[in-house]
Amino acid sequence: MMHDEPFTSVAWETPADDDRELHASASSSTAPSHPPDALATSVSHVQVTDPKTELEGTKDTFVSYLVSAKTDLSHFASKEPTSRRRFQDFTFLREHLQKDFPAAVVPPLPDKHRMEYLTGDRFSAEFIERRRMDLQRFLERVARHPKLSRTSLFQNFLESTEWNVFKHKHTAHPSDPDPPSGIIDHLSDTLLNAFAKVRKPDERFVEMRHHLDQFEEGLVSIERLGARSKTRLADLSGDYEDLASSVQGLGYLESGITDPLTRFERALNEFGAAVKDNSGLTTDPFLEHLHSLLAYSASFKGVLKLRDQKQLDFEELSSYLSNVSSERDRLAGGYGYGMGLGSYFKEKVESLRGGEADGSKEAKLARLDAKIKELSDAVIASQDTSQAFNDEVMIEHDIFQLAKRSEMKELLSAFADGQMSLYQQSIRTWDKFATLKESSRARG
Protein backbone atom coordinates (compact mmCIF):
# COMPACT_ATOMS: atom_id res chain seq x y z
CA MET A 1 0.00 0.00 0.00
CA MET A 2 1.45 3.34 -1.07
CA HIS A 3 1.41 6.27 1.31
CA ASP A 4 0.38 9.87 0.87
CA GLU A 5 3.73 11.35 1.87
CA PRO A 6 6.03 11.82 -1.16
CA PHE A 7 9.23 10.61 0.50
CA THR A 8 7.95 7.85 2.79
CA SER A 9 9.68 5.19 0.72
CA VAL A 10 13.10 6.74 1.27
CA ALA A 11 15.15 4.65 3.67
CA TRP A 12 18.19 6.32 5.13
CA GLU A 13 19.78 3.00 6.03
CA THR A 14 20.07 1.20 2.71
CA PRO A 15 19.80 -2.59 3.08
CA ALA A 16 22.85 -4.50 1.97
CA ASP A 17 20.73 -6.68 -0.29
CA ASP A 18 19.06 -3.87 -2.26
CA ASP A 19 20.26 -5.34 -5.55
CA ARG A 20 18.92 -8.77 -4.65
CA GLU A 21 15.54 -7.21 -3.84
CA LEU A 22 15.52 -5.42 -7.18
CA HIS A 23 16.38 -8.51 -9.17
CA ALA A 24 13.86 -10.58 -7.25
CA SER A 25 11.13 -8.06 -8.07
CA ALA A 26 11.93 -8.47 -11.76
CA SER A 27 11.40 -12.22 -11.60
CA SER A 28 7.95 -11.99 -10.00
CA SER A 29 4.56 -11.93 -11.77
CA THR A 30 5.96 -12.75 -15.21
CA ALA A 31 8.79 -14.90 -16.44
CA PRO A 32 12.10 -13.04 -16.65
CA SER A 33 14.06 -12.82 -19.88
CA HIS A 34 16.93 -14.77 -18.28
CA PRO A 35 17.02 -17.79 -15.99
CA PRO A 36 16.78 -17.02 -12.25
CA ASP A 37 20.45 -17.76 -11.59
CA ALA A 38 21.42 -14.99 -14.02
CA LEU A 39 19.66 -12.48 -11.82
CA ALA A 40 22.35 -12.91 -9.17
CA THR A 41 24.84 -11.10 -11.41
CA SER A 42 24.73 -7.60 -12.80
CA VAL A 43 26.54 -4.64 -14.32
CA SER A 44 28.17 -2.36 -11.77
CA HIS A 45 30.72 0.43 -11.32
CA VAL A 46 29.54 2.15 -14.50
CA GLN A 47 31.58 5.27 -15.16
CA VAL A 48 31.59 7.97 -17.83
CA THR A 49 34.97 9.72 -17.80
CA ASP A 50 37.65 11.36 -19.93
CA PRO A 51 35.57 13.63 -22.22
CA LYS A 52 37.45 14.50 -25.41
CA THR A 53 36.57 17.09 -28.03
CA GLU A 54 37.11 15.45 -31.42
CA LEU A 55 37.36 16.93 -34.92
CA GLU A 56 37.84 20.28 -33.22
CA GLY A 57 37.66 23.27 -35.51
CA THR A 58 35.32 21.60 -38.00
CA LYS A 59 31.54 21.66 -38.37
CA ASP A 60 31.50 18.01 -37.24
CA THR A 61 33.05 18.69 -33.83
CA PHE A 62 31.73 16.43 -31.09
CA VAL A 63 32.62 15.24 -27.59
CA SER A 64 33.28 11.57 -26.87
CA TYR A 65 33.32 9.92 -23.44
CA LEU A 66 35.09 6.88 -22.08
CA VAL A 67 32.52 4.40 -20.78
CA SER A 68 33.63 1.63 -18.42
CA ALA A 69 31.94 -0.92 -16.18
CA LYS A 70 32.36 -4.17 -14.28
CA THR A 71 30.14 -7.20 -14.76
CA ASP A 72 29.74 -10.88 -13.97
CA LEU A 73 27.26 -11.51 -16.77
CA SER A 74 28.35 -14.44 -18.92
CA HIS A 75 27.35 -12.95 -22.29
CA PHE A 76 29.90 -10.14 -21.93
CA ALA A 77 33.24 -10.75 -23.61
CA SER A 78 35.08 -8.92 -20.82
CA LYS A 79 34.50 -8.61 -17.10
CA GLU A 80 35.57 -4.97 -17.35
CA PRO A 81 34.13 -3.67 -20.65
CA THR A 82 35.16 -0.27 -21.98
CA SER A 83 34.23 1.81 -25.00
CA ARG A 84 34.26 5.38 -26.23
CA ARG A 85 30.87 6.84 -27.10
CA ARG A 86 29.43 10.20 -28.13
CA PHE A 87 26.12 11.72 -27.09
CA GLN A 88 24.20 10.45 -30.12
CA ASP A 89 25.23 6.90 -29.15
CA PHE A 90 23.57 7.38 -25.77
CA THR A 91 20.51 8.69 -27.60
CA PHE A 92 20.43 5.59 -29.83
CA LEU A 93 20.70 3.34 -26.77
CA ARG A 94 17.79 5.02 -25.02
CA GLU A 95 15.50 5.26 -28.04
CA HIS A 96 15.93 1.58 -28.92
CA LEU A 97 15.62 0.37 -25.34
CA GLN A 98 12.34 2.27 -25.23
CA LYS A 99 11.22 0.76 -28.53
CA ASP A 100 12.26 -2.80 -27.67
CA PHE A 101 10.85 -2.65 -24.12
CA PRO A 102 7.81 -0.34 -24.18
CA ALA A 103 6.67 -1.45 -20.71
CA ALA A 104 10.03 -0.62 -19.13
CA VAL A 105 10.76 2.72 -17.46
CA VAL A 106 13.78 3.72 -19.55
CA PRO A 107 15.71 6.50 -17.77
CA PRO A 108 15.82 9.97 -19.36
CA LEU A 109 18.85 11.57 -20.95
CA PRO A 110 20.15 15.09 -20.36
CA ASP A 111 18.56 17.68 -22.65
CA LYS A 112 15.29 15.87 -22.05
CA HIS A 113 14.73 17.97 -18.93
CA ARG A 114 15.46 21.53 -17.92
CA MET A 115 19.10 22.66 -17.92
CA GLU A 116 18.88 26.29 -16.85
CA TYR A 117 21.63 25.72 -14.30
CA LEU A 118 24.12 25.04 -17.12
CA THR A 119 26.00 27.96 -18.58
CA GLY A 120 28.21 28.32 -21.63
CA ASP A 121 28.10 26.60 -25.02
CA ARG A 122 28.01 22.83 -25.40
CA PHE A 123 31.79 22.62 -25.76
CA SER A 124 32.57 24.62 -22.62
CA ALA A 125 34.27 22.76 -19.77
CA GLU A 126 31.34 23.31 -17.40
CA PHE A 127 28.72 22.10 -19.87
CA ILE A 128 30.74 19.00 -20.76
CA GLU A 129 31.26 18.11 -17.11
CA ARG A 130 27.58 18.50 -16.22
CA ARG A 131 26.59 16.45 -19.24
CA ARG A 132 29.11 13.79 -18.28
CA MET A 133 27.52 13.54 -14.84
CA ASP A 134 24.05 13.21 -16.37
CA LEU A 135 25.22 10.55 -18.83
CA GLN A 136 26.77 8.57 -15.99
CA ARG A 137 23.54 8.82 -14.01
CA PHE A 138 21.64 7.53 -17.08
CA LEU A 139 23.93 4.49 -17.44
CA GLU A 140 23.80 3.78 -13.70
CA ARG A 141 20.01 3.63 -13.91
CA VAL A 142 20.12 1.31 -16.91
CA ALA A 143 22.72 -0.89 -15.19
CA ARG A 144 20.51 -1.04 -12.09
CA HIS A 145 17.54 -2.27 -14.16
CA PRO A 146 17.44 -6.11 -14.06
CA LYS A 147 16.09 -6.44 -17.60
CA LEU A 148 17.62 -3.52 -19.52
CA SER A 149 21.10 -4.25 -18.16
CA ARG A 150 21.00 -7.75 -19.67
CA THR A 151 20.12 -6.78 -23.22
CA SER A 152 22.49 -7.26 -26.14
CA LEU A 153 21.93 -3.59 -26.91
CA PHE A 154 23.42 -2.50 -23.58
CA GLN A 155 26.19 -5.09 -23.84
CA ASN A 156 27.28 -3.85 -27.27
CA PHE A 157 27.06 -0.24 -26.12
CA LEU A 158 29.49 -1.02 -23.30
CA GLU A 159 32.04 -3.13 -25.15
CA SER A 160 31.53 -3.42 -28.91
CA THR A 161 34.40 -2.23 -31.09
CA GLU A 162 32.04 -2.29 -34.08
CA TRP A 163 29.26 -0.25 -32.52
CA ASN A 164 28.25 1.52 -35.74
CA VAL A 165 27.86 -1.82 -37.52
CA PHE A 166 25.76 -3.09 -34.62
CA LYS A 167 23.56 0.00 -34.77
CA HIS A 168 22.79 -0.57 -38.45
CA LYS A 169 22.01 -4.24 -37.87
CA HIS A 170 19.83 -3.50 -34.86
CA THR A 171 17.90 -0.84 -36.77
CA ALA A 172 17.36 -3.21 -39.70
CA HIS A 173 16.55 -6.23 -37.52
CA PRO A 174 15.37 -5.10 -34.08
CA SER A 175 15.26 -7.69 -31.32
CA ASP A 176 11.56 -7.02 -30.78
CA PRO A 177 10.07 -6.03 -34.14
CA ASP A 178 6.74 -4.28 -34.34
CA PRO A 179 3.79 -6.64 -34.54
CA PRO A 180 2.02 -6.91 -37.88
CA SER A 181 -0.79 -4.47 -38.47
CA GLY A 182 -4.20 -5.74 -37.49
CA ILE A 183 -7.69 -4.60 -36.75
CA ILE A 184 -6.51 -2.14 -34.06
CA ASP A 185 -4.55 -0.22 -36.71
CA HIS A 186 -7.67 0.12 -38.87
CA LEU A 187 -9.74 1.27 -35.90
CA SER A 188 -7.23 3.65 -34.35
CA ASP A 189 -8.36 6.73 -36.27
CA THR A 190 -12.03 6.27 -35.49
CA LEU A 191 -12.21 4.57 -32.13
CA LEU A 192 -8.97 4.64 -30.20
CA ASN A 193 -8.36 8.37 -30.00
CA ALA A 194 -6.01 10.06 -27.60
CA PHE A 195 -8.81 11.90 -25.81
CA ALA A 196 -10.75 8.81 -24.74
CA LYS A 197 -10.61 7.80 -21.09
CA VAL A 198 -10.38 4.38 -19.55
CA ARG A 199 -13.86 3.31 -18.48
CA LYS A 200 -12.83 1.05 -15.63
CA PRO A 201 -9.61 2.46 -14.11
CA ASP A 202 -7.42 -0.05 -12.28
CA GLU A 203 -6.97 1.31 -8.75
CA ARG A 204 -3.39 0.00 -8.60
CA PHE A 205 -2.29 2.29 -11.39
CA VAL A 206 -4.45 5.20 -10.29
CA GLU A 207 -2.64 5.01 -6.95
CA MET A 208 0.74 4.79 -8.69
CA ARG A 209 0.04 7.96 -10.65
CA HIS A 210 -1.16 9.73 -7.52
CA HIS A 211 2.01 8.70 -5.70
CA LEU A 212 4.17 9.96 -8.59
CA ASP A 213 2.29 13.28 -8.55
CA GLN A 214 3.00 13.66 -4.83
CA PHE A 215 6.64 12.69 -5.30
CA GLU A 216 7.05 15.31 -8.04
CA GLU A 217 5.34 17.94 -5.91
CA GLY A 218 7.84 17.21 -3.15
CA LEU A 219 10.78 17.46 -5.57
CA VAL A 220 9.50 20.74 -7.03
CA SER A 221 9.10 22.16 -3.53
CA ILE A 222 12.67 21.16 -2.61
CA GLU A 223 13.91 22.58 -5.91
CA ARG A 224 12.23 25.90 -5.23
CA LEU A 225 13.80 26.11 -1.78
CA GLY A 226 17.18 25.04 -3.15
CA ALA A 227 17.12 27.72 -5.85
CA ARG A 228 16.15 30.34 -3.26
CA SER A 229 18.95 29.18 -0.98
CA LYS A 230 21.43 29.38 -3.87
CA THR A 231 20.45 32.98 -4.57
CA ARG A 232 20.76 33.97 -0.93
CA LEU A 233 24.14 32.27 -0.54
CA ALA A 234 25.39 34.08 -3.65
CA ASP A 235 24.27 37.34 -2.06
CA LEU A 236 25.94 36.37 1.22
CA SER A 237 29.21 35.56 -0.54
CA GLY A 238 29.13 38.93 -2.27
CA ASP A 239 28.37 40.70 1.00
CA TYR A 240 31.39 39.08 2.69
CA GLU A 241 33.62 40.07 -0.23
CA ASP A 242 32.37 43.66 0.00
CA LEU A 243 32.93 43.65 3.76
CA ALA A 244 36.46 42.33 3.22
CA SER A 245 37.18 45.20 0.80
CA SER A 246 35.91 47.71 3.34
CA VAL A 247 38.07 46.19 6.09
CA GLN A 248 41.06 46.30 3.75
CA GLY A 249 40.46 50.01 3.11
CA LEU A 250 40.16 50.62 6.84
CA GLY A 251 43.50 48.88 7.37
CA TYR A 252 45.18 51.35 5.04
CA LEU A 253 43.82 54.21 7.11
CA GLU A 254 44.56 52.77 10.57
CA SER A 255 48.28 52.00 10.47
CA GLY A 256 48.35 50.90 14.09
CA ILE A 257 46.01 47.97 13.55
CA THR A 258 46.78 47.11 9.92
CA ASP A 259 47.94 43.54 10.63
CA PRO A 260 44.81 42.45 12.60
CA LEU A 261 42.56 44.04 10.01
CA THR A 262 44.46 42.30 7.20
CA ARG A 263 43.96 38.94 8.94
CA PHE A 264 40.29 39.73 9.43
CA GLU A 265 39.98 40.71 5.76
CA ARG A 266 41.65 37.42 4.74
CA ALA A 267 39.21 35.42 6.90
CA LEU A 268 36.25 37.23 5.38
CA ASN A 269 37.48 36.50 1.85
CA GLU A 270 38.10 32.85 2.67
CA PHE A 271 34.63 32.45 4.11
CA GLY A 272 33.01 34.24 1.13
CA ALA A 273 34.94 32.02 -1.30
CA ALA A 274 33.90 28.89 0.62
CA VAL A 275 30.24 29.91 0.35
CA LYS A 276 30.62 30.51 -3.41
CA ASP A 277 32.43 27.20 -3.95
CA ASN A 278 29.73 25.38 -2.02
CA SER A 279 27.15 26.58 -4.53
CA GLY A 280 29.09 25.14 -7.46
CA LEU A 281 30.14 21.91 -5.77
CA THR A 282 26.97 21.12 -3.83
CA THR A 283 23.90 23.19 -4.70
CA ASP A 284 24.18 23.03 -8.50
CA PRO A 285 24.62 19.21 -8.64
CA PHE A 286 21.80 18.92 -6.10
CA LEU A 287 19.41 20.91 -8.30
CA GLU A 288 20.47 19.06 -11.45
CA HIS A 289 19.88 15.69 -9.77
CA LEU A 290 16.42 16.91 -8.75
CA HIS A 291 15.66 17.78 -12.39
CA SER A 292 16.84 14.32 -13.44
CA LEU A 293 14.60 12.64 -10.86
CA LEU A 294 11.64 14.68 -12.10
CA ALA A 295 12.36 13.51 -15.65
CA TYR A 296 12.72 9.91 -14.42
CA SER A 297 9.30 10.16 -12.79
CA ALA A 298 7.90 11.61 -16.03
CA SER A 299 9.25 8.54 -17.87
CA PHE A 300 7.31 6.32 -15.50
CA LYS A 301 4.19 8.39 -16.13
CA GLY A 302 4.72 7.86 -19.86
CA VAL A 303 4.68 4.10 -19.29
CA LEU A 304 1.49 4.43 -17.23
CA LYS A 305 -0.10 6.41 -20.06
CA LEU A 306 0.84 3.68 -22.53
CA ARG A 307 -0.63 1.09 -20.15
CA ASP A 308 -3.90 3.05 -20.12
CA GLN A 309 -3.87 3.01 -23.92
CA LYS A 310 -3.54 -0.79 -23.90
CA GLN A 311 -6.55 -1.04 -21.61
CA LEU A 312 -8.41 1.48 -23.75
CA ASP A 313 -7.68 -0.63 -26.85
CA PHE A 314 -9.25 -3.63 -25.12
CA GLU A 315 -12.28 -1.67 -23.92
CA GLU A 316 -12.95 -0.05 -27.30
CA LEU A 317 -12.55 -3.33 -29.17
CA SER A 318 -14.89 -5.03 -26.70
CA SER A 319 -17.44 -2.26 -27.21
CA TYR A 320 -17.10 -2.52 -30.98
CA LEU A 321 -17.56 -6.29 -30.81
CA SER A 322 -20.68 -5.82 -28.70
CA ASN A 323 -22.12 -3.37 -31.23
CA VAL A 324 -21.41 -5.65 -34.18
CA SER A 325 -22.92 -8.61 -32.32
CA SER A 326 -26.05 -6.58 -31.57
CA GLU A 327 -26.21 -5.53 -35.19
CA ARG A 328 -25.98 -9.15 -36.27
CA ASP A 329 -28.76 -10.13 -33.85
CA ARG A 330 -30.99 -7.35 -35.16
CA LEU A 331 -30.37 -8.41 -38.73
CA ALA A 332 -31.04 -12.06 -37.90
CA GLY A 333 -34.30 -10.96 -36.27
CA GLY A 334 -35.37 -9.12 -39.40
CA TYR A 335 -34.62 -5.56 -38.23
CA GLY A 336 -31.77 -4.71 -40.63
CA TYR A 337 -29.37 -2.11 -39.31
CA GLY A 338 -31.87 -0.97 -36.79
CA MET A 339 -33.99 2.15 -36.55
CA GLY A 340 -32.84 5.73 -36.78
CA LEU A 341 -31.24 8.18 -39.17
CA GLY A 342 -27.73 7.08 -38.20
CA SER A 343 -28.39 3.48 -39.15
CA TYR A 344 -29.88 4.59 -42.47
CA PHE A 345 -26.81 6.67 -43.35
CA LYS A 346 -24.50 3.84 -42.29
CA GLU A 347 -26.23 1.45 -44.68
CA LYS A 348 -26.07 3.99 -47.52
CA VAL A 349 -22.34 4.74 -46.92
CA GLU A 350 -21.48 1.05 -46.97
CA SER A 351 -23.49 0.69 -50.16
CA LEU A 352 -21.52 3.51 -51.81
CA ARG A 353 -18.22 1.94 -50.66
CA GLY A 354 -19.19 -1.29 -52.30
CA GLY A 355 -19.58 -3.09 -49.01
CA GLU A 356 -23.10 -4.18 -49.87
CA ALA A 357 -22.58 -5.54 -53.40
CA ASP A 358 -24.51 -8.59 -52.31
CA GLY A 359 -27.51 -7.21 -50.50
CA SER A 360 -29.05 -10.52 -49.45
CA LYS A 361 -29.68 -11.12 -45.78
CA GLU A 362 -27.52 -14.25 -45.81
CA ALA A 363 -24.58 -12.36 -47.31
CA LYS A 364 -24.89 -9.61 -44.71
CA LEU A 365 -25.01 -12.17 -41.92
CA ALA A 366 -21.94 -13.93 -43.34
CA ARG A 367 -20.01 -10.66 -43.43
CA LEU A 368 -21.07 -9.84 -39.87
CA ASP A 369 -20.07 -13.32 -38.68
CA ALA A 370 -16.65 -12.86 -40.25
CA LYS A 371 -16.33 -9.45 -38.62
CA ILE A 372 -17.37 -10.90 -35.24
CA LYS A 373 -14.75 -13.65 -35.59
CA GLU A 374 -12.07 -11.09 -36.45
CA LEU A 375 -13.08 -8.83 -33.59
CA SER A 376 -13.26 -11.73 -31.11
CA ASP A 377 -9.68 -12.71 -31.94
CA ALA A 378 -8.59 -9.07 -31.65
CA VAL A 379 -10.32 -8.69 -28.27
CA ILE A 380 -8.59 -11.81 -26.90
CA ALA A 381 -5.21 -10.63 -28.19
CA SER A 382 -5.80 -7.13 -26.81
CA GLN A 383 -6.79 -8.51 -23.41
CA ASP A 384 -3.67 -10.67 -23.28
CA THR A 385 -1.53 -7.68 -24.25
CA SER A 386 -3.17 -5.45 -21.66
CA GLN A 387 -2.75 -8.02 -18.89
CA ALA A 388 0.88 -8.67 -19.79
CA PHE A 389 1.53 -4.93 -19.82
CA ASN A 390 -0.10 -4.63 -16.38
CA ASP A 391 2.20 -7.33 -15.00
CA GLU A 392 5.27 -5.62 -16.43
CA VAL A 393 4.26 -2.24 -15.03
CA MET A 394 3.87 -3.75 -11.56
CA ILE A 395 7.44 -5.05 -11.82
CA GLU A 396 8.64 -1.67 -13.11
CA HIS A 397 7.01 0.01 -10.11
CA ASP A 398 9.06 -2.11 -7.70
CA ILE A 399 12.25 -1.36 -9.66
CA PHE A 400 11.51 2.37 -9.71
CA GLN A 401 10.76 2.42 -5.97
CA LEU A 402 14.12 0.84 -5.15
CA ALA A 403 15.94 3.14 -7.57
CA LYS A 404 14.16 6.17 -6.12
CA ARG A 405 15.05 5.18 -2.57
CA SER A 406 18.71 4.73 -3.53
CA GLU A 407 18.90 8.02 -5.43
CA MET A 408 17.10 10.04 -2.77
CA LYS A 409 19.57 8.79 -0.18
CA GLU A 410 22.48 9.61 -2.50
CA LEU A 411 21.03 13.04 -3.35
CA LEU A 412 20.31 14.21 0.19
CA SER A 413 23.45 12.61 1.65
CA ALA A 414 25.65 14.44 -0.87
CA PHE A 415 23.89 17.71 -0.09
CA ALA A 416 24.30 17.15 3.67
CA ASP A 417 28.00 16.28 3.18
CA GLY A 418 28.47 19.50 1.19
CA GLN A 419 26.87 21.58 3.92
CA MET A 420 28.98 19.94 6.61
CA SER A 421 32.11 20.53 4.55
CA LEU A 422 31.21 24.23 4.25
CA TYR A 423 30.71 24.64 7.98
CA GLN A 424 33.85 22.67 8.84
CA GLN A 425 35.88 24.89 6.55
CA SER A 426 34.25 27.94 8.10
CA ILE A 427 35.18 26.74 11.58
CA ARG A 428 38.79 26.24 10.50
CA THR A 429 38.89 29.71 8.92
CA TRP A 430 37.57 31.52 11.98
CA ASP A 431 39.51 29.35 14.45
CA LYS A 432 42.71 30.28 12.63
CA PHE A 433 41.76 33.96 12.77
CA ALA A 434 40.88 33.71 16.47
CA THR A 435 44.20 31.97 17.22
CA LEU A 436 46.17 34.67 15.41
CA LYS A 437 44.19 37.36 17.19
CA GLU A 438 44.95 35.84 20.62
CA SER A 439 48.63 35.49 19.72
CA SER A 440 48.77 39.11 18.67
CA ARG A 441 47.04 40.19 21.86
CA ALA A 442 49.51 38.16 23.95
CA ARG A 443 52.46 39.80 22.23
CA GLY A 444 50.90 43.24 22.78
Image (spheres, helix red, strand yellow):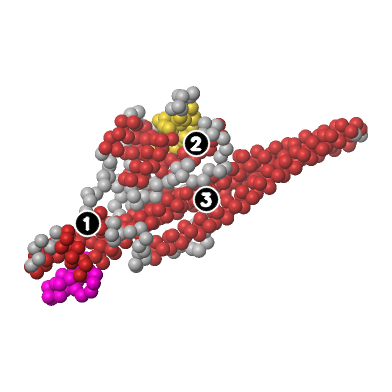
- CA gap between label 1 and label 2 equals 45 Å
**Residue at image point 41% right, 43% down:** 142
Q: Quadrant of residue 74?
A: top left
Crowding at label 1, few (<14), some or many (≥20) Cα neighbours within 10 Å?
few
Label 3 crowd (10 A; few <14 / some 14-19 / many >=20): many
* Mark closer to the chain start, 1 or 2: 2
In the image, 186: left or right of 125?
left
Q: Helix or strand or loop: what does disc 1 sit on?
A: helix
Q: Residues within 10 Å of mark 2 (few under 14, many from 20)?
A: many
**Amino acid type, mark 2:** Arg
From the image, tell me which residue sits under label 1: 183
Mark 2, residue position: 132
* Residue 228 seen in the current view: yes
Which residue appears at 23% of the width and 72% of the height?
341
Above/below status of 126 relative to 384: above
Q: Are marks 1 and 3 in contact (CB under 8 Å)?
A: no
Q: Nearer the viewer, mark 1 or mark 3?
A: 1
Q: Which residues are magenta?
A: 321-343
Name which of mark 1 and mark 3 comes first in the sequence: 1
| Residue 431 shows up from this direction | no
Residue 408 numbered mark, or none: 3
Q: Name above or below for residue 72 compared with residue 194.
A: above
Q: Is residue 161 left or right of residue 237?
A: left
Residue 157, given in percent of the width and then of the height, sits at 37, 35
Alpha carbons under labels 1 and 3: distance apart: 45 Å
SS label for mark 2: helix
Give the foreground label among 1 and 2.
1
Q: Tell me which numbered mark, 3 or 2, is placed earlier along the sequence.
A: 2
The chief SS type of the magenta part is helix
The amino acid beneath tag 1 is Ile
- Residue 311 occupies which quadrant of the picture? bottom left
What residue type is disc 3 on?
Met
